[in-house]
Structures are given as structure tokens and as C-alpha cells.
Image (tube, rainbow, N blue to C red):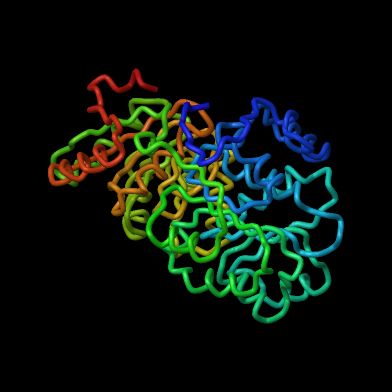
Amino acid sequence: MQDIYFKCNENFKKHEYFDSMEGLKYEILKGIYSKGYQNPSKIQSIIIEPMYKTKRDVIAQAHSGTGKTAAFTISTLQLIEKTKETQILILSPTRELTEQTYLVYKDLSKYMNLSVHMSIGGTNRYHEITKLKKDKPHVVIGTPGRVFDMIRNDVLSLTHLKCLILDEADEMLNFGFKQQLYDIFEYLPENVQVGLFSATMPEECLKISKKFMRDPITILVKADQMTLDGINQYFINVGDEKNKFLFVCDLFKTTSIPQAIIFCNSKVKVDWLKEKIADALLGDDKEGITANFIGFIHGDMEKNERKKALDDFRATQTRILVTSELISRGIDIQHVKLVINYDLPKVKTNYIHRIGRSGRMGRKGIAINIINSNEIKYLIDIRNHFHTQIDELPENYVGLF
């Protein structure tokens, strides 16, 4: 586990083991160990027990790879009673993150006989309404737009809700969900527990905490540790923009990297780069085997296409995934060693989310920023913003892999 320092506003006991957490249900412990978790991560060791014991609101600044999803999953599962009512609501900014969180809940609750429901756009609304009317799930995980649609149409009742989690709250606000979040808060029971989890704490997040939260437990990452330790960060200045593509080709021709994610800033460039890489590396043989070598994801794709591309990459059926900002947040892909920023992110804070796709949960990773001569100053701004080290890529970079 990377040694990230979390500062808590109160002195709670830190746990080295899950089974030392007071009163944690045996069924949850079975789920934890069957999923392969051995010891709590830093944030898990601090926040799990206070969340379910004190039932106080929580603000946690925790970026990708720190184990935050499992932290709030375990805490909220502990709160659930057997009564067949919706007791936990998790809101996420994207379908992909919602689906991932849903799977974590299903895995950790596998011995609890609970009902977990996923509520996202792009699925059959009539079927969801029918399902929610027939079966009141203990846990609902969804995107704000669809969840609010179910609430305001009296399909999803929050009368018995115990806890609301806002996951990647800053990104939900960036995606324009502010009004839906405020609307959902209007339906909450008076004493519901609120957990706000966010990689950064912009002013809008703080406004939500002041307006809707009471005396929260606050856990913040130390300011100079906002990037992920355990990830070696490099840059290469290729001079002209067109040389970026030539470097990518050389990189994959001269190394045996198992898997890599390449980030671009636009959907058009994702499509263009995927085709260019396939042409350059596969040539005349690309027909029929491209899908087994390179995949791509962006926001204009259908939900099932995006899911297949992500599932194929997770299953190591594809070697390269070219993507927009869409999967930079929270998506857990275990085997990625290399992240390439073909374009530097337009928003500085997205840098840590992108490079966090490698080196997950303490594993070593590499991030390479390909820049042209006009982007040097912006890369320096990113480096200074996060107080991090970004070295020039050595000429004999093959040895890094």
C-alpha cells in the first residue's frame, strides 16, 4: 500500500485488521476475506469503524486506488437491518463507476442475503420502475439523474434511508448534477447519515457539506501527497505534435508492456488514435485481430459498447485502451502498469485520476506524459500544483518495463 498520509479531525483508533473492528458482522468479514482483502488500507483503517459506530456524517478526501469504495461499502453494509426497505443510497457520476461500485457491494454482501439495485440511464426505464415497485432493495446505487427520476415519481422511497454516499462528489458537480443532488437532499429523512467522498474539495463540495451535513468527521489527504506514491512519472518532449504518434508506435514496438491506457482530450482524437495505432502496429493484418489488441472508450458510444470495451480490457483480451476522460475516475483495472497522457488533461486535478489507473492499491505503475514544445509550461504547472516529481523519460526506457 502506498504510504499516503490522511489527516483526521478527530483521534479515532486505527485498525491493522478488519476483524479488530468492533462489532463488524461476521457475514461482512466473510465477504471481505472471500474478495481477497487481507488488511485495511490507510483510509479503511481510519474511517470504517467510526462511520458505522458514530453514525456521523463524513467528509473524506480520497483519490483513486486508496480503497475508498470498499471503505464506505463495508461501513454502510454494517448499518443495514433485515427490514425490506431501501436503507443505503450511493450516488456516482458515471454509469461505469456505478457498475463497478455495484459489483463491490454484491461481492462484499454475498453472505448477507441483501438486495442491491443499480439505477442508471440508458437502461429500460419501465422495467426498472416495475422492479422497484415489486422489490424494495436494501441498497440503491445510481447516477443522480435516474435516481431522482425514480424518487420524484414515487417509485423509490427514501423514508427508511439510513445513509447517503456521494462518491466522486467533485466530478458529479463537474458533470452538472448540482441541481439533482440538491433535489435529492430535499427527500432525505431528517437524521440520515451523509458521506461525501471526493478526490478534491472544490468550493461547491464545501458548500454542500455546509448546507446539508452536521458536525462531520473529516479526513483529508496531506496537501503534498495528492499524487499517488508508487507511480513513477515521466515526460518526453517530442517537439512537434505529430511526433507524439511516432513515439507511441516506437514504445509499443520496442517494449512488451502487457497493458496500457492512453488518455486523449476529445472523442474525435480517441477514434483517430485508435485507428492510427491499429494501422501502424498491425498493418494489413489488422482486420479481425484489432479487437484483440486495442480497444477504445468515449462518451458517444452506446452503453453496451463501452461496457464490452472495458470488460475486454479488464479480462486482458485487449492490450491497449484509448480513452477520453470518461474512465479516469475510480474505475478499478487491476493489471495496468502504464498510463500515457497523449494529451495533458485540461483540468489539473484530473491528472491524479488518470495516472491513478496504474499502480492500483500499492502496486508499482508508470505514467508517461507526451508533450509538445508548447506544453512544457503547463506540465511544470501540474508538477508544482501537486508538489510531485516528473522526470524526463530516459533514452533507454525499455528497461523500465
| Residue 350, horizontal then vertical, whole percent | 37, 49
Taking the image as drawn, is residue 96 in sight?
no
| Residue 141, horizontal then vertical, whole percent | 65, 59
The residue at the point 73 percent across, 43 percent down is 107
- Give the left or right position of residue 229, taking residue 148 as reference: left
- Give the left or right position of residue 270, taking residue 382 as reference: right
| Residue 260, horizontal then vertical, whole percent | 43, 37
Q: Quadrant of residue 195?
A: bottom right
| Residue 151, horizontal then vertical, whole percent | 66, 75
Give above or below for 353 relative to 144: above
In the displayed orientation, state which residue is furthest to the bottom: 153
- Closer-to-camera residue (368/401): 368
Q: Quadrant of residue 170?
A: bottom left
Image quadrant in which the C terminus is located: top left
Taking the image as drawn, is residue 291 in sight?
yes
Give above or below for 167 relative to 31: below
- Closer-to-camera residue (226/315): 226
Q: How many marks?
A: 0
The residue at the point 59 percent across, 60 percent down is 91
